Image (cartoon, helix red, strand yellow):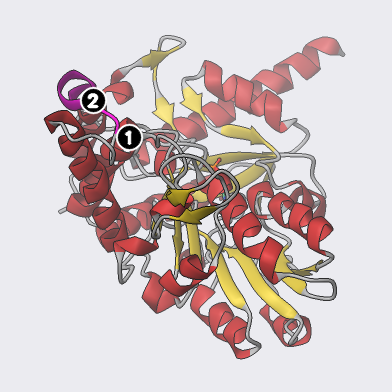
């Protein structure tokens, strides 16, 4: 059985109070909390074997290198990548996408080529492509979003042409919660000879993800959204693709030989990891992966589905709530956006915070999607493995308190 109580006991921060109320943390799509196993791994590394990796021949360097490279193996296994040579450590999803956009895009795109994105992309999977399009003369096209918050897949026939060189789409929307049918999109992309890049920032933490089943060529995600530390991202790309690409950053570690005027490159994946990497945080990320693996990604997903169903039901019972995104639980994850009639999302977020409930209010780095929804911002509650239905009840109580608070202030002003 999925033992939430036991899981919660591993997260010290969940015991704290905010404004004298027990914390209800529902901002998991922004970043997640860390279990003590991850925190301990950081302390252990700095207390016992802090050293620079790959280059040293002393015991500490050896231990640190082994631990760092072991996490590369664990990461490959976590997403079912055929080899750890396909795993590049970066700082976050944003850097992973920028790395690929630059290292692949600059030498593979030319005027007239097309990059196909969607209207629901996070700025991280939009702005890098705008920059690369500008640099190479390629153009951008977009899969539209329907009123129900799904991708309009019927448009793919029209949008995918032999000019399409890359399809870059999010697996799960950070605003609508929509889970996109990546395997189908990848198949359609490959039919016209395009590569498929998946923004997995919101999916890898919450669903079992298998890059071979998805048949994607590239996948990007962040440690901090899956119980790990900030400052670690992952770029998965098929080995042949990484082999064929030039480096993104130049410097130490990524070279095989250096002359005064030219250099040759290290093997993959090190060719893409210039300079001293984020050793401590990568090692602690390994503990996060192990934690998720022990809890079981299918069990986590089932728990989140239950919470999401409960959250959607309770929210729809509140007067004046507008919900965004699909209602079908099979088509969505646990990032739930909503607005309260007549109230600014930032005001809602502030009053919820006063009640000890942490949610996000804003454009969620998805301004084009906000325009499509015809709102400036939304409130977003997002769940993870340690959340409970009781916490959702606290959110709903706090929402009702917010509505009552603003109704009283409006009344007082008259
Ligand atoms: N893509 C999606 C769908 C996201 O939700 C996020 C973060 O919220 C990102 C990309 C960017 O992640 P990071 O800030 O870790 O680079």
* Quadrant in which the C terminus is drawn: top right
User: With 22 as the anchor, is 165 left or right in this view?
Assistant: right
Q: Which mark is residue 279?
A: 1
Circles 1 and 2: CB atoms closer than 8 Å: yes
x then y, percent, for residue 287: 23, 41
Q: Which mark is residue 50?
A: 2
- The residue tagged with tag 2: helix, strand or loop? loop
Residue at the spot 50% in from the left edge and 51% down from the top edge: 201
Residue span colored magenta: 43-52
**Residue 232 lies in what quarter of the image?**
top left
Q: Is residue 149 visible?
A: no
x then y, percent, for residue 18: 43, 14
Residue at the spot 74% in from the left edge and 38% down from the top edge: 341
Q: Is mark 2 within 8 Å of ligand 1?
A: no
- Magenta stretch holds residue 295: no
- Above or below: residue 304 compared with residue 155: above
Q: Is residue 171 visible?
A: yes
- The residue tagged with tag 1: helix, strand or loop? helix
Q: How many marks?
A: 2
- Specify the principal SS of the magenta part: helix
x then y, percent, for residue 172: 53, 59
């Amino acid at each position: 059985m999925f033992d939430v109580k036991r899981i919660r006991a591993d997260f010290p921060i969940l015991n704290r109070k905010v404004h004298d109320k027990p914390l209800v943390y529902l901002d998991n799509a922004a970043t997640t909390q860390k279990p003590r196993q991850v925190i301990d791994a950081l302390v252990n590394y700095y207390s016992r074997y802090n050293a620079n990796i790959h280059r040293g021949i002393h015991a500490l360097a050896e231990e640190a290198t082994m631990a760092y490279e072991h996490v590369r193996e664990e990461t490959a296994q976590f997403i079912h990548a055929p080899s750890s040579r396909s795993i590049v450590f970066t700082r976050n999803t944003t850097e992973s996408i920028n790395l690929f956009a630059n290292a692949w895009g600059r030498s593979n795109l030319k005027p007239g080529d097309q990059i196909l994105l969607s209207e629901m992309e996070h700025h991280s999977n939009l702005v890098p492509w705008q920059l690369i399009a500008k640099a190479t003369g390629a153009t951008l096209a977009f899969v539209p979003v329907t009123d129900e918050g799904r991708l309009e897949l019927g448009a793919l026939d029209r949008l995918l042409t032999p000019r399409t060189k890359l399809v870059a789409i999010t697996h799960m929307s950070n605003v609508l919660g929509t889970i996109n049918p990546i395997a189908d999109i990848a198949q359609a992309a490959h039919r016209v000879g395009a590569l498929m890049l998946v923004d997995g920032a919101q999916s890898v933490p919450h669903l079992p993800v298998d890059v071979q089943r998805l048949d994607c060529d590239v996948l990007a995600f962040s440690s901090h959204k899956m119980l790990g530390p900030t400052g670690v991202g992952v770029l998965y790309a098929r080995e042949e693709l990484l082999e064929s690409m030039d480096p993104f950053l130049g410097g130490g570690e990524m070279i095989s030989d250096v002359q005064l005027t030219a250099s040759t490159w290290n093997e993959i994946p090190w060719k893409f990891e210039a300079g001293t990497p984020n050793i401590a945080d990568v090692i602690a990320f390994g503990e996060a992966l192990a934690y998720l693996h022990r809890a079981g990604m299918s069990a986590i997903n089932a728990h989140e589905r239950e919470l999401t169903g409960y959250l959607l039901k309770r929210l729809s019972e509140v007067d004046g709530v507008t919900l965004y995104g699909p209602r079908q639980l099979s088509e969505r994850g646990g990032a739930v956006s909503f607005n309260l009639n007549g109230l600014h999302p930032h005001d809602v977020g502030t009053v919820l915070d006063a009640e000890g409930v942490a949610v996000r209010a804003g454009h969620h780095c998805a301004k084009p999607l906000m325009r499509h929804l015809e709102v400036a911002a939304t409130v977003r509650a997002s769940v993870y493995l340690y959340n409970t239905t009781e916490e959702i009840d606290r959110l709903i109580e706090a929402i009702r308190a917010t509505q009552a608070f603003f109704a009283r202030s409006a009344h007082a002003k008259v």
